[in-house]
Structure formats: structure tokens, C-alpha cells
Image: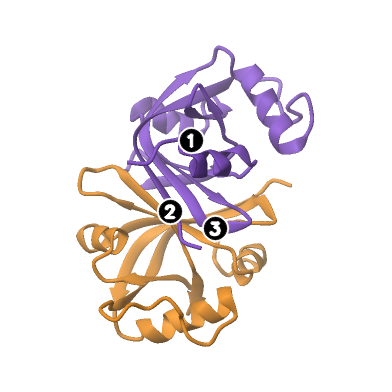
Chain colours: A purple, B orange
Amino acid sequence: MASLDDPGVRALLDKPNHAVVSTFNEDGSIHSTVVWVDVQDGRLAVNSAVGRTWPSNLERDPRVTVMVYDENNPYDYVEVRGTARGSTEGADAHIDRLAKRYLGVDSYPFRTPDEQRISYVVEPTRVRHQKQR
Amino acid sequence: MASLDDPGVRALLDKPNHAVVSTFNEDGSIHSTVVWVDVQDGRLAVNSAVGRTWPSNLERDPRVTVMVYDENNPYDYVEVRGTARGSTEGADAHIDRLAKRYLGVDSYPFRTPDEQRISYVVEPTRVRHQKQR
């Protein structure tokens, strides 16, 4: 299988492309949403606030699929399937790093007073890289 | 719930943004891939070749989630959950229309001699539109 360390995959993930995170809803259907993503210690890392739909889905069932395609060439994409591990520790610093990466600002500007951030790191079971053109 | 007829959703789908189609693998994990999409009679329509992974998944389990985000503003996206209905009839003409939409050519240039195209139309059970910025 492909690896997040492959140069082509790394190039795709080095750019601030967005990710589509897909999780299991309670009724078994698939929930997909668009999020920021970066790489931490060779694994995909995404961030949300505790209690939102997809983190709640992951608390119930940690299986996740993350799709990242190159917004300048959607025929170049990586699909990562795996298991998500959530942590609130370091999640505030992580969302600030993501805000830097995607918005160019030092601090995440959309915090609400009552939210607690949570980071999920994806332990990959399968990495599929396609580059068709 | 939102509808594919909502002006904001329609604007998103009128542009040749790509779709991330998520289906159920045999082992229960989520398969996500990037495809072309258009709207037929008010429903999302995607196209593949018979025997590939995600059409095979849909033959086993027709539940599907399709995510389309604006490649120029990923904070504007629509998630459609529903049931896919496949048909080989008209699928060749459909892939040609998609090739026109995405590549600007009259005929899909990547056909292989042995492939049979198949179109899937998604009967929506839930449409979620987010436009955060």
C-alpha cells in the first residue's frame, strides 16, 4: 500500500488542501464533512470541537476515512482509512497551527467561549494514492 | 432540510466542482473517491465503469454519501446522503456530458475497450448545505 511518507503523497499533504472526513452516523449512514488537516508524526491530524457531529461519531465508532484531493488537480488524491484517536490535550495549539496553515493567522479566529477543541490523529490501516493525470 | 433546488446549493453544483463519493466496503469500512458529478432531474448523478470498487460497493449496499465543496471556497459545501440507483442505459452519453463539463471535450477520452459505463443517480434522504464564509 501507499504510505504518507511517499513523496507524491507528501507533496499533496504539504499543500493546504482540505480534507473530507467520513464517519459513521448512529443510523449507520456515512457522515462527510470538510475540515482542515495536517500531518503530525507521520499521521493525519484533524480538529473539531467536542460535541459536534463527527467527533461524536468517532467517540462511538473510531473508524474513519479521510480523503484529500489537490484542489488544483483533483485527479491527484489520497484516501486514508484508519482509526481515529481523540485528545483534547494540545488541541488548542493544533487549531492555531491549522489556522496559520489555512488562513495565515496566528490564532484560530472562530473560537466560541464554550467550545472545547479536540484533535484526532488517524492511525492508518490503508493508504491509497491516485494520480491519474 | 436543504434541497438541491436551493439557490445556494444550485450555484455550488452548477460549477464543475468534483464530488467525493463514499460507499461501504465489504468489511464495513468507508471507501471514498473523487468523481465527476452533475444534476439530472434534480438529483446528483455520478458515473463509473462496471466492476470498479465503488460501483461494486453500491451493488451490494446502495447507501451513499456525496460531498461537493466549492474548490474556490471549501467552506461552502453540500453533503447529500441517499440511495444510489445504477443504470448502464444512457451511461455512455452521461460520461460524455461529464467530459464536456469537466474537460471541455465532446467525448470522454479515457474509455477502455472492455469497460461498460454505469451511471448512479442519488435519491436523497438528507441534504446538508454549509456556507460558513
The image quadrant where one finds the N terminus of chain A is: top left
Task: Give the Cα separation between the discs numbered 3 and 1.
Answer: 27 Å
Which is closer to the viewer, label 3 or label 2? Answer: 2
A20 w.r.t. A72: above or below: above
Q: Element type at marker 2?
A: strand
Residue most extreme to the top: A89
- Quadrant in which residue B115 is drawn: bottom left
Q: Mark yes or no: residue B48 visible.
A: yes
Residue A81 percent location from the top left of the image: 36, 38
Q: Earlier in the sequence, mark 1 or mark 2?
A: 1
Q: Hey, what amino acid is under mark 2?
A: Gln
Q: Which mark is residue B67?
A: none
A83 w.r.t. A22: above or below: above
Which is closer to the viewer, label 1 or label 2? Answer: 2
Residue under label 2? A130
Label 3: chain letter = A
What residue is rendered at 76% in x and 24% in y? A107
Label 1: chain letter = A
Residue A131 percent location from the top left of the image: 47, 56
Q: Which mark is residue A53?
A: 1
Q: Element type at marker 1?
A: helix
Q: Earlier in the sequence, mark 3 or mark 2?
A: 3
Q: Mark yes or no: residue B42 visible.
A: no
Residue under label 3? A74
What residue is rendered at 70% in x and 24% in y? A96
Residue A52 percent location from the top left of the image: 52, 32
Q: Earlier in the sequence, mark 3 or mark 1?
A: 1
Residue A132 percent location from the top left of the image: 46, 61
